[in-house]
Amino acid sequence: MNWGSILEFLGTDAPTQGLIWTIFALGVFVSYRILDVADLSVESLFPFAGILSLLFVNNGIHPILAILIAVILGGIIGFINGCLHIYFKINPLLAGIIIMVALYSPNVIISSGNISLNTDTYTIFTGLNTVIDNYVVSKLLILGFITLGIMALMYWFFGTELGLSLRAAGKNINMARAQGINTNSRYLLGMVFSAILISLSGALYGQMIKHVSPDAGKGSIVIGLTIIFLGEVLLGHRSFKLSLFSVALGGIIYWLIIDIIIQIPGFNTNYLNLLKGILITFVVVIPEIKKFISKRAKNKGQKPLKEND
Amino acid sequence: MIKLEHLCKDFVSNNPLLPVNKVLKDINLTINDGDFISVIGSNGSGKSTLLNTISGSYLPTSGKIYFDDTDVTQLKDFKRAKYIGRVFQDPNVGTIGDISIEENLALAFKRGERRGLSWALKEEYEKVYARHLTPLNLGIENRLHEKISTLSGGQRQSITLLMSILKKPKLLLLDEHTAALDPKTSKKIMELTKDLVEENKLTTLMITHNMRDALKYGNRLIMLSNGRIIADFSSSEKNRLTIEDLYDRFDKAEEDTSFATNIN
């Protein structure tokens, strides 16, 4: 690859989209991998934050403040989602579905169907553009900075006593309670943490794409999970630090794949969701195939392949 | 001193023939400091329910539980955890396989304490872990960064045992903690348990299915049948008992119960 083609690639939406969905996948990682909950509320939470951030910016609020408010409101939604499980004993999967369905209405109402950024309105991405004379590069810098910041924050937080206790509560509720950990409060904290990351990615998405409809989050959970699984296939999850990096790597590779597929001449984009479905199935199946092969090698008395776990 | 007063625990079930299942019936027990009590009883006698009620996993239907003079009856399990070290039957329940040995130990090191935003793994802790792990002769002190799932069941159970006493508990609860292990490993863990209990002068309540262990270890033996304590042997009485004596006592207790239910 020469420099020209790298710049050409950077000029596409793939890297920036990849970073936004990496932040999203880090949020899914918190709910799915740490709390062991398939939280479907993200499908509505993502456009919710995107719509809000555009609404605020259109009404003259500073873009960073707009993102901040959208994220706080998203965090509250995450808290409600957690409460549905903790206080009303609703199955976590169902609680997520309830939020997903219920949040769709406010999304339609506040966006009046769909919302676009007013022309000549500043976003978080245009600020740096006045300094660096390249919109794509400034987008990449801002998103890269935020993504790295979140990864550092997560690495720190989940390494603290509180963060470790949250991981314990998600992995083994009996053990956690026997060690004096209030698993209910940890669950709520985790759900809010996840919702904050989802909302942040949604809010950034809104200001970057400049157009959000309530359907923007459709299939987003599949994207998030594919990124997580893809990262694990590539890097494994031997340690927490590695897991964080694998999500980031997964995010970038995922969009690379999608971008390449879309650019195939004559590709009908209606097939995209089908392809996403095939991709996630494929990524989930790979570790199983690896296991199968190593088992067969063992049975034949050969040296087994190193298992990737 | 731990005191159980008139402890009862009912479970409400969907079974129309047995809508209320009385598992514990008026349990009175005083556990003195330094006691090592073995609890035996057949399936369904209420052993595990007793342990879970003491630990707070279940709240009793009636009765009181005191730790020293503190009434802990309504205290939730995770709040009671500061008094109690627990070892479960399944090593997978007592530890988290997916995180490192060190992280498991760090979780136990802070049992019942406030967990803040300071780093969970500290170098000074490693020395404490090493001091506890070295006598086990398992070489685990050099493998602190590995995941617990890389250890065998026996090794995992040794770690769980260690975790339960890393912060000295007022009461150590052992729930058939050797039942899932092979006989040889089981014996090793029992010896380790004995050493740790003696060394740290721990007050211990141990459920076991193994009559031999029940007679061999501890200074008291309690027999549970049908939700009641039917015998409480002191150290000297226990030493004279044989396994046959225990079976006889159980048979007699069961006859009495079936007689009682026939009258009802």
Image: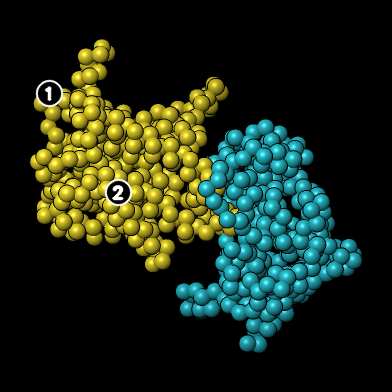
Chain colours: A yellow, B cyan
Residue at figure coordinates x 57%, y 67% from the top left: B76
Is B240 situated above or below A116? below
Q: Earlier in the sequence, mark 2 or mark 1?
A: 2
Q: Chain of mark 1?
A: A
User: Residue type at mark 2?
Assistant: Leu
Is B140 situated above or below A160? above
User: Residue type at mark 1?
Assistant: Pro
Along the line of sight, the residue nearer the viewer: B132 or A61: A61
Helix, strand or loop at disc 2?
A: helix
Residue A30 appears left or right of A256: right
Where residue A93 sits: x, y (%)? 35, 55
Q: Chain of mark 2?
A: A
Q: Which mark is residue A68?
A: 2
Where residue A181 sits: x, y (%)? 55, 56
Residue A187 seen in render: yes
Where residue B131 sits: x, y (%)? 74, 40
Residue A261 seen in render: no
Is A161 situated above or below A238? below
Give the residue at the far top of this rendering: A2
Residue A125 appears left or right of B66: left
Residue B128 appears left or right of A255: right
Residue at figure coordinates x 71%, y 66% from the top left: B41
In the image, which is nearer the foreground, mark 2 or mark 1? 2
Where residue B53 sits: x, y (%)? 62, 68
Residue at figure coordinates x 85%, y 68% from the top left: B234
Q: Which mark is residue A106?
A: none
How far, Cα to Cα, is label 2 from label 1? 40 Å
The residue carrying mark 1 is: A265
Residue A21 appears left or right of B243: left
